[in-house]
Image (spheres, grey):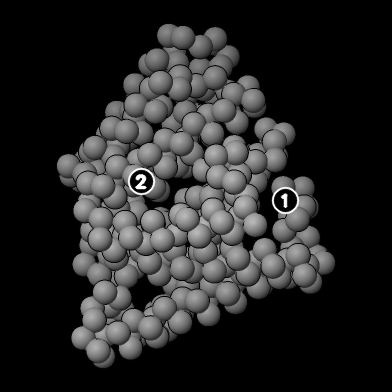
Amino acid sequence: MKRILTAVVLIPLVLALILWGPLWLQMLLACVVAELALHEYMAMAQVSGVQSPQWFVHLSCALLFVVAYWSSAFLLPTLGIFALALLGICSLRSPLERILAETAGGFFGLMYIAFPMLLAPLIAAQENGTADLLFLLVVVWAGDITALYVGRTIGRRPMAPVISPKKTWEGAAGSLAGSVAAGMGLVLCGSQMYRRGILTLLFTESWWYWLVLAVLLNVAAQIGDLLESAIKRGAGIKDSGSLLPGHGGMLDRVDALLLALPVLWYALLFRQLL
């Protein structure tokens, strides 16, 4: 019930932000989500023995969103600067045998959490980006819901028993089916709205493009969930936090998006080349 109530509150807020929120507000809230997830990641890294300078990692995350809002062309050079600066800081403060691990742990947090999260408002800012981002969220959310219920109902064969004992192949198959059904349903809904002169959900590509994209996004989301489970298992904890009732921490909630967002970003780049 906590899981359902949390979703009932958060989903309308997220949809309203994507549909009507200005870019600066989307960037701000995406940054807040990234910072909260990054805080949970850094806590897990500390449990694992990696003591990266948290103040610098959080500051770098915020600055990445500022740079992305100003000009996304400077993102990669900025990441390079942060990597070198982090190496310098760790060289001065960390034991010699920990310099590499703590530099890598902090920089990985930026690449794993901050960089994918800032892609969300950048995608929404593109032509038809609102529809693309909504497609992503619907596909990921539907896959997560169907995996939960199918896995609990008929799940028998574990997918990755060492990393996540409760995940099953039956649940994964149900997740894929749910994502495809929800994604194609949204495309059909968008087509009906377009015929009535409503351009909010404009899906211009053929149905097979969205079918393939739904499959790719679902696979990426499931892998993203497993990757976060591996980090948690390595740290010896069940949830990354307790911020969201019924869902665990913020990182638990966005873990699937951290791989799905880059997949969507590159799919959109591929679409522009066609």
Give the quarter of the image for residue 3.
Answer: bottom right
Q: Position of residue 182 (x, y in %)?
A: 50, 76
Relative side of 147 to 270, left or right: right
Q: Residue at x 47, y 28 (%)?
A: 106
Picture layout, residue 269 above or below residue 160: below
Q: Position of residue 171 (x, y in %)?
A: 70, 67
Q: Nearer the viewer, mark 1 or mark 2?
A: 2
Mark 1 belongs to which amino acid?
Ser
Picture layout, residue 266 above or below residue 50: below
Q: Position of residue 13 (x, y in %)?
A: 38, 56
- Give the residue number, with chain letter if any, for mark 1: 164
Q: Secondary structure at mark 1?
A: strand
Mark 2 belongs to which amino acid?
Ala
- Give the residue number, with chain letter if any, for mark 2: 30
Who comes first in sequence, dot 1 or dot 2?
Answer: 2
Relative side of 85 to 220, left or right: left
Q: Secondary structure at mark 2?
A: helix
> Which residue is nearer to you in this view: 235 or 192?
192
